[in-house]
Image (cartoon, rainbow, N blue to C red):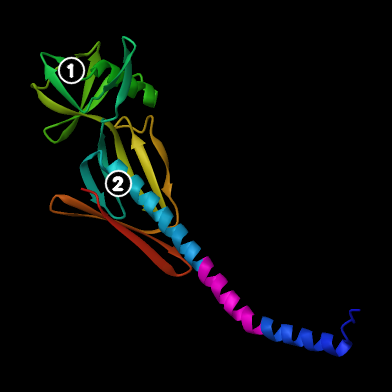
Amino acid sequence: MKRAFSLLEMTIAMAVFSILIALVAPILREFYLLHFKALRQNEAMLDLNIALMSVDKLFSHCVQVRIYNEGFHCALRDEESVFDLENHKLFLRNSSLILDKNGTLYSPKSDFKLALQNRWDLFADKEKKIYILKDGKIQTLSLENGKILAPNLSGGIFILLQAGLDLRLEDGILKYELRPRFFSDALMQNGIMAERITRFTLRKQGENFFLKICTQDEGVEYCLEKILR
């Protein structure tokens, strides 16, 4: 026959239990705080890495880079690939380089008209104009059925441009603006690339660009750096 706990035994057991809790609680609390801090740090570094990779992807298409305080401006090369179905086979087209020959634009190994139509559809832009980089300058060409309406350029290799890009840090928010029409705000697209950013530094050294981006959490600053080119 089992006997019940006496009041004295129960009091002693509760006292021992209370002492154990008092001893273990600070350790558990410290473990929880360290674990929570590690999670916050990992989350901050993950957000930073995503922002860094996003900037790197955009920057890989940049030409005519101009650096300013906590941001930069550049023109984006039109290097997006276009899939085309021909005779029940899938072909990959590209429009990174175009040539001017007798007033006609074309691109070897690609379908220029298809790439141009894709750009117009992408930006909902039906103006018969394209932007190119020639001799270090951004120039506008008016087209009609692939022909230059006012041919004023000599033959050569051009870089087809997609849009002007502005990336800047304002009040802890990394913002971007895309201008498919370089000299106009028409069709401009803008958005947020990252938040809680404390520093955004781009510098050029030789042929390479070095990017440093930082965030802060509870007084601790976390930074990542990357060579973009």
Viewer-proximal residue among 213 and 24: 24
Decide whether the magenta segment is chiefly helix, strand or loop. helix
What amino acid is at disc 2? Asp
Query: Could you tell me residue 105's position as x and y percent?
Result: 17, 17
Viewer-proximal residue among 133 and 61: 61
Query: Could you tell me residue 113's position as x and y percent?
Result: 26, 16
Q: Residue at x 36, y 33 (%)?
A: 185
Q: In this picture, which residue range is highlighted in magenta?
A: 22-36
Picture quadrant where residue 31 is located: bottom right
Q: On residue 106, which mark appears?
A: 1
72 lies left or right of 109: right
Q: Residue at x 26, y 52 (%)?
A: 68
Marks 1 and 2, how far apart at CA: 30 Å
Q: Does 207 appear above or below 4?
A: above
Q: In the image, is residue 24 part of the stretch drawn in magenta?
A: yes
Dot placed on the residue nearer the N-terminal end, 1 or 2 = 2
Q: Does 199 appear above or below 155?
A: below
Name the quarter where the N terminus is drawn.
bottom right
Q: Judging from the image, what secondary structure is the residue with disc 2 in? A: helix
Q: Residue at x 25, y 38 (%)?
A: 61
Q: Which residue is mark 2?
A: 56
